Amino acid sequence: LEPPRPSHELYAEAYLLMGRIHAQLLNFKMAFQFWDMALETSPETRESIEAQRLDLAEYWLKRAEEEPTITVKCLKRTLIFCNKKEFLLKVKEKFWQYINNMLMRWVVVEGKFEDAREFLDLLKPLRDSTPEWDYIMGKFHMHKGEKTDALLHIEKAVLHPFDQDSKPVAYPGWMQDYARVLIENSRFDEGIERLGQAVAMDPNQAALWEEIGDTLFENKDYSTAAVAYEKCYTALPDKIDVLRKFGDCYRCLNHGEAARAAYEAVLEKDPSNEAARSALGKLL
């Protein structure tokens, strides 16, 4: 007589156990391979696999709370084991500000694009209820020079149907970025309109006018550059150097008296401004 062969259920149970063991040994690739084998052997194991994954996600989420020195590592493992929307809402409640700051730092300051993209992909189920997801993804594409994708995500974030008074504190900055990517995508008039809205919410967003002026000046469009600098200076009168650039535009347009008035105004506010003093000297 042949010895009895193990049933599919026994194989499936063994695969489930091996998956759990490898997960506890931090060999996540092997854990998922065994769970896939269990599911392939017996589709009825799906519920058990999901329960194991949720249990492990809860474990790593708790460690993220308790051990701040390894929070990022714990959060990543949390999301790897479970990124269903219902669970992610719990993660968001506990850690969203931390995650938001971390992702913005990775994208804007440190250039850790692969790390940021991995987290963003794991957090994607939150997209419709969390406009910050699209904003960060937009910044991701902005800093990679992918202007079409940047516009797609920034626009979705800005146009999110916010409840009354629920817009994030950083929303004026979102609007400025929206203006920027509109302009970069050759939708200049729309970009200028959005920039006006951003400045109306927060005058500091007028700094983009200076960047626009710099670009126009480099392209020798001195008249339009002067308008851009004027708009920046009107909103941010402490930006003395913008007033000096305003004078540079008039100097290049051969409007000597207007240029002189601008340089003198700069020196009146900042007598140590050598750039304005030198430019004024060239007019004499």
Image: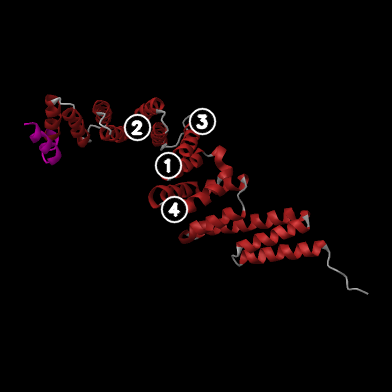
Q: Is residue 73 magenta?
A: no
Q: Magenta segment, which residues? A: 268-284
Residue 65 appears at what percent x and percent y?
A: 51, 56
Q: Nearer the viewer, mark 4 or mark 3?
A: 4
Q: Which mark is residue 202?
A: 2
- Which callout, 4 or 3, points at the residue further toward the start of the chain? 4
Hey, what amino acid is under mark 2? Asp
Q: Is residue 212 visible?
A: yes
Decide whether the magenta segment is chiefly helix, strand or loop: helix
The secondary structure type at the circle numbered 3 is loop
Real-space Cα separation, disc 4 to disc 1, in angstroms: 14 Å
Circle 3 crowding by C-alpha within 10 Å: few under 14, some 14–19, many from 20: few
The secondary structure type at the circle numbered 1 is helix
Residue 246 appears at what percent x and percent y?
A: 20, 30
Work out whether residue 185 or residue 242 is closer to the camera in this orientation and state it: 185
The secondary structure type at the circle numbered 2 is loop
